């Protein structure tokens, strides 16, 4: 597998939601410029608190995203959102695995299946 998929499960308190939306708009704009970032989507649950992020990167794109794109926003992001779970699909190299473990990552190795190329909307 030449890519990594991350799925974050988190919550944001309702009074912080507007500030969180403004922050993620900045992160999304920068992520959109990363050619190795294939999917970067936030979804909000009907409760107005639950947030999921689905990210897919080419293998070489994950670490630069975590360190360079997300890094400058990490402290503020983590004050607004509480991460409850992170699932990592793929086989990240040791350095990346260590970074993702700081978010409490659960790693799942490929078993079977396929992925089709997607076209950006």
Image: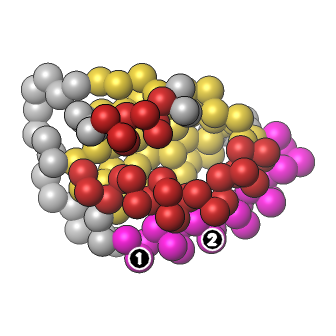
Residue 1, visible in the rendered structure: yes
Residue at image location 58% in from the left, 57% down from the top: 71
Pointer 2 residue:
26
Q: In which quarter of the image is residue 94?
A: top left
Quick one: SS at disc 2?
Answer: helix
In this view, which residue lies farthest toward the front? 95
Q: Earlier in the sequence, mark 2 or mark 1?
A: 2
Pointer 1 residue:
33
> Relative to residue 27, is residue 105 depicted above or below?
above
Residue closer to the observer: 54 or 30: 30
Residue at image location 54% in from the left, 52% down from the top: 42
The x and y percentages for residue 114 are: 11, 39
Quick one: SS at disc 1?
Answer: loop
Q: Would residue 59 appear left or right of 103 to someone viewing this image?
A: left
> Relative to residue 78, is residue 89 depicted above or below?
above
Residue closer to the observer: 12 or 33: 33
The x and y percentages for residue 11 are: 70, 36
Q: Give the range drawn in magenta.
A: 13-34
Query: What is the quadrant of the N terminus in the image?
Result: top left
In this view, which residue lies farthest toward the right? 15
Q: Residue 76 carries which label?
A: none
How crowded is the residue under tag 2: few (<14 C-alpha within 10 Å), some, or many (20+)? few
SS majority, magenta: helix
Residue at image location 55% in from the left, 48% down from the top: 43
Q: Would residue 104 appear left or right of 121 to someone viewing this image?
A: right
Residue 14 highlighted magenta (yes or no): yes
Badges 2 and 1: C-beta atoms under 8 Å apart? Answer: no
Residue at image location 77% in from the left, 47% down from the top: 80
How crowded is the residue under tag 1: few (<14 C-alpha within 10 Å), some, or many (20+)? few
């Amino acid at each position: 597998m030449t890519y990594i998929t991350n799925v974050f499960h988190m919550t944001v308190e309702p009074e912080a939601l507007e500030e969180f939306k403004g922050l993620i708009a900045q992160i999304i704009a920068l992520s959109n410029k990363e050619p190795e970032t294939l999917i970067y989507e936030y979804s909000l649950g009907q409760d107005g608190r639950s947030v999921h992020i689905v990210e897919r990167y080419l293998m070489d794109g994950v670490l630069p995203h975590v360190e360079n794109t997300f890094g400058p926003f990490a402290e503020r992001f983590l004050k607004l959102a509480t991460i409850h779970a992170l699932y990592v699909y793929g086989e990240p190299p040791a350095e990346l695995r260590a970074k993702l473990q700081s978010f409490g990552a659960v790693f799942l190795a490929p078993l079977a299946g396929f992925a089709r190329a997607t076209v950006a909307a």
